[in-house]
């Protein structure tokens, strides 16, 4: 890695829900333009980890530095971080009372203070890119799951984020819609976006990821380039997980 | 044997609706012996109740007259002549006669604003709404109280009738909604002190009857104020009514807030929207939309509760009808009944309009968001 500061630098991160420790001493550094895939069994803390990065969850111990800004209770800094970090959720979370276009222009207008016309122009460009511009005036409820998730990606991109977080973006989609979302994500990776993706799409991990991180019981068990990770997994838990997930 | 379809079937037209008028009656009113019996019973009750009521209100009613004699006729029904003679008082109370045009103007502008707001294709309706919420109340206040621009002062103690009813209801409705929204947010706040204050406020006000609140506002409050300090009775009542209904509104709004999934807050936060923007732009529009029926229900309740101001000596619409029952000029057997029927009719028209309007708004808002 070069001497540029990392996009995300996590050191010694510990987090508890009450007495239950969800994250145990996480160290993770993500360079600019790097693509990381995080996988692991359900409940292993993957979502919690990436939600700590834009502080949808707070942490009790350790350091998280995003784009040179350390996350603490300073609200202004949190908003600065959030403006630079886009997030895509498993359940899309589009705003149902706004049209597709309004979903995409809302934050640029109210957070980035863009003039309305320019926000629309930019939003249309991103909607074009995820190939959904023709639906701009519909409401989220009128779109299929795959279409909604593509809108969610466009909505995040409208904030010009430097980092994109994906939390199982294809897990609630019907099989025939997974590809259209993955294609958008692959395109994004090709443009050099820094990406952290929690996903079980191993094909995506193989082609796109620079590194694959395997989590179990709140810890990072193994971390490697995809080639090594899939062909020569080191940890027995990784082997077990991979055999389960690749068997069907 | 295997089968592979080589042509697509064309879509068939839907079967014709099988029911005519008679079919409808058969299906809906006499589908079973029990249902048929209930239908007959219902018709019997209507036959008992409706004709006498029509006779009383319309056929045997007295429409014209200048005093009780007209309504003292043997077998006379409703004494509408009484209502006609007293209509001015029912509408304006004791508001100075020469200044009634000011009330008319306020009514007119208000009605015009509401009517224009209902016209959905009007461009820039947003500004009209702002006018309605921000400018109109000030305008109405200046016109009604006077004291500036050469308008003579009209004491609030002279206000009455429908005017007073509208003033109390309008102020109560427009102020209690935002207040209720803040209370609901407070009750769901992360900050323990704010949460506690909101809970205490809501539970205290919900726990006392409005009559008690009105008495406290008009009789007891002055006892606690230093002597010489006295403020308008109507104002005190307005404050009481508003604070009271804010507590109800808070619970209605909270119901809507609870129905908003966590993902909506998270998506808003992830986009960098802070607490106020997230609530203003994302959460409240959805939450309020969901509880429109309950909000309107509360409005209707509040509107009818304004009649209670009577007990602290203010004469609202119903109150100013009631005081006129003791007017010797109109003492007749049917006077009171006529007055009450008239009051009920007017209240019903207003409340029913509110309810219909809310149905319309709801339907329009749901149009886009409904899944096809
Ligand atoms: N708000 C919460 N309160 C308490 N426990 C939680 C909360 N959110 C998640 N957990 C627990 O933390 C663990 C990790 O959750 P999560 O990060 O969602 O796992 P994953 O995304 O890997 O499936 C799970 O055991 C889950 O039950
Ligand atoms: Mg998860």
Image (tube, coloured by chain):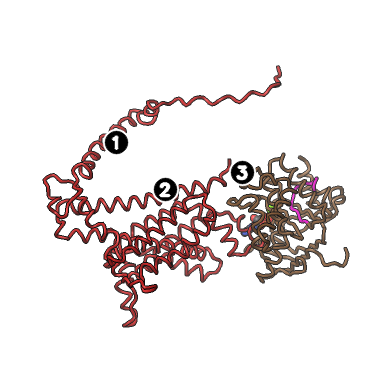
Chain colours: A brown, B red
Q: Which of pointers 1 and 2 lies earlier in the amino acid sequence?
A: 1
Cβ of mark 1 under 8 A from ligand 1: no
Residue on which the image places disc 2: B356
Q: Chain of mark 1?
A: B
Nearest to the eye among marks 2 and 3: give it.
Answer: 2
Secondary structure category for the residue under label 1: helix
In the displayed structure, B219 sits above or below B131; it is: below
Nearest to the eye among marks 3 and 1: give it.
Answer: 3
**Cβ atoms at labels 1 and 2 below 8 Å apart:** no
Residue on which the image places disc 1: B42
Please give the name of the residue rendered at 71% of the width and 65% of the height, measured from the top-left corner. A81
**Cβ atoms at labels 3 and 1 below 8 Å apart:** no
In the displayed structure, A103 sits above or below B45; it is: below
Image side of residue A13 versus residue B34, left or right: right
Question: How far across and down, in percent of the image, does residue B233 sit?
Answer: 32, 71
What crowding class fits label 1: few (fewer than 14 Cα within 10 Å), some (14-19), or many (20 or more)? Answer: few
Q: Which residues are magenta?
A: A195-204
Question: How far across and down, in percent of the image, does residue A128 sit?
Answer: 73, 48
């Amino acid at each position: 890695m070069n001497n540029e500061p990392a996009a995300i630098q996590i050191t010694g991160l510990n987090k508890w829900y009450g007495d239950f420790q969800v994250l145990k001493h996480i160290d993770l550094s993500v360079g600019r333009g790097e693509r990381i895939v995080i996988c692991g069994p359900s409940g292993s803390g993957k979502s919690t980890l990436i939600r700590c990065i834009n502080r949808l969850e707070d942490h009790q111990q350790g350091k998280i530095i995003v784009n040179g800004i350390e996350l603490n209770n300073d609200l202004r800094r949190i908003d600065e971080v959030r403006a630079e970090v886009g997030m895509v959720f498993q359940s899309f979370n589009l705003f149902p009372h706004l049209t597709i276009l309004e979903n995409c222009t809302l934050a640029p207008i109210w957070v980035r203070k863009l003039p309305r016309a320019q926000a629309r122009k930019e939003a249309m460009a991103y909607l074009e890119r995820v190939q959904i511009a023709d639906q701009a005036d519909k409401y989220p409820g009128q779109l299929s799951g795959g279409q909604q998730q593509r809108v969610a990606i466009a909505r995040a991109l409208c904030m010009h984020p430097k980092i994109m977080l994906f939390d199982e973006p294809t897990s609630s989609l019907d099989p025939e819609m997974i590809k259209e979302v993955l294609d958008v994500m692959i395109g994004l990776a090709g443009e050099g976006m820094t990406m952290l993706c929690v996903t079980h799409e191993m094909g995506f991990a193989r082609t796109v990821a620079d590194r694959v991180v395997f989590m179990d019981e709140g810890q990072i068990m193994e971390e490697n380039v995809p080639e090594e990770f899939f062909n020569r997994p080191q940890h027995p838990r990784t082997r077990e997980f991979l055999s389960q997930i690749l068997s069907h | 044997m295997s089968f592979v379809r080589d042509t697509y079937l064309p879509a068939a037209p839907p079967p014709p609706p099988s029911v005519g008028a008679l079919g409808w009656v058969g299906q809906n009113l006499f589908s079973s012996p029990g249902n048929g019996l209930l239908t007959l019973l219902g018709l019997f009750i209507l036959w008992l109740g409706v004709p006498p009521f029509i006779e009383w209100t319309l056929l045997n009613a007295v429409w014209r007259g200048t005093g009780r004699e007209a309504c003292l006729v043997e077998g006379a029904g409703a004494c509408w002549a009484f209502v006609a003679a007293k209509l001015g008082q029912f509408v304006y109370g004791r508001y100075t006669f020469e200044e009634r045009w000011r009330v008319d103007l306020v009514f007119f502008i208000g009605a015009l604003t509401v009517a224009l707001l209902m016209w959905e294709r009007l461009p820039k309706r947003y500004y009209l709404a702002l006018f309605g919420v921000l400018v109109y109340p000030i305008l109405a206040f200046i016109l009604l109280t006077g004291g500036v621009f050469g308008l003579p002062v009209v004491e609030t103690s002279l206000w009455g009738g429908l005017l007073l009813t509208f003033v109390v209801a309008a102020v109560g409705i427009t102020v209690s909604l935002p207040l209720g929204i803040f209370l609901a947010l407070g009750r769901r706040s992360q900050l323990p002190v704010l949460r506690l204050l909101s809970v205490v406020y809501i539970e205290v006000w919900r726990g006392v009857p409005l009559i008690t609140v009105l008495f406290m506002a008009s009789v007891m409050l002055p006892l606690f104020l230093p002597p010489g300090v006295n403020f308008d009775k109507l104002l005190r009542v307005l404050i009481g009514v508003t604070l009271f209904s804010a507590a109800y509104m808070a619970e209605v709004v909270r119901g809507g807030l609870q129905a908003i999934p966590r993902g909506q807050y998270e998506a808003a936060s992830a986009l960098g929207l802070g607490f106020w923007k997230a609530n203003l732009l994302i959460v409240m529009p959805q939450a309020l939309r969901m509880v429109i029926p309950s909000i309107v229900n509360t409005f209707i309740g509040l509107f009818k509760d304004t009649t209670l101001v009577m007990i602290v000596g203010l004469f609202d619409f119903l109150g100013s009808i009631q005081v006129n029952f003791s007017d010797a000029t109109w003492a007749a057997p049917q006077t009171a009944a006529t007055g009450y029927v008239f009051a009920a009719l007017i209240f019903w028209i207003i409340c029913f309009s509110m309810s219909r309007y809310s149905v319309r708004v709801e339907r329009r808002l749901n149009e886009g968001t409904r899944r096809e």
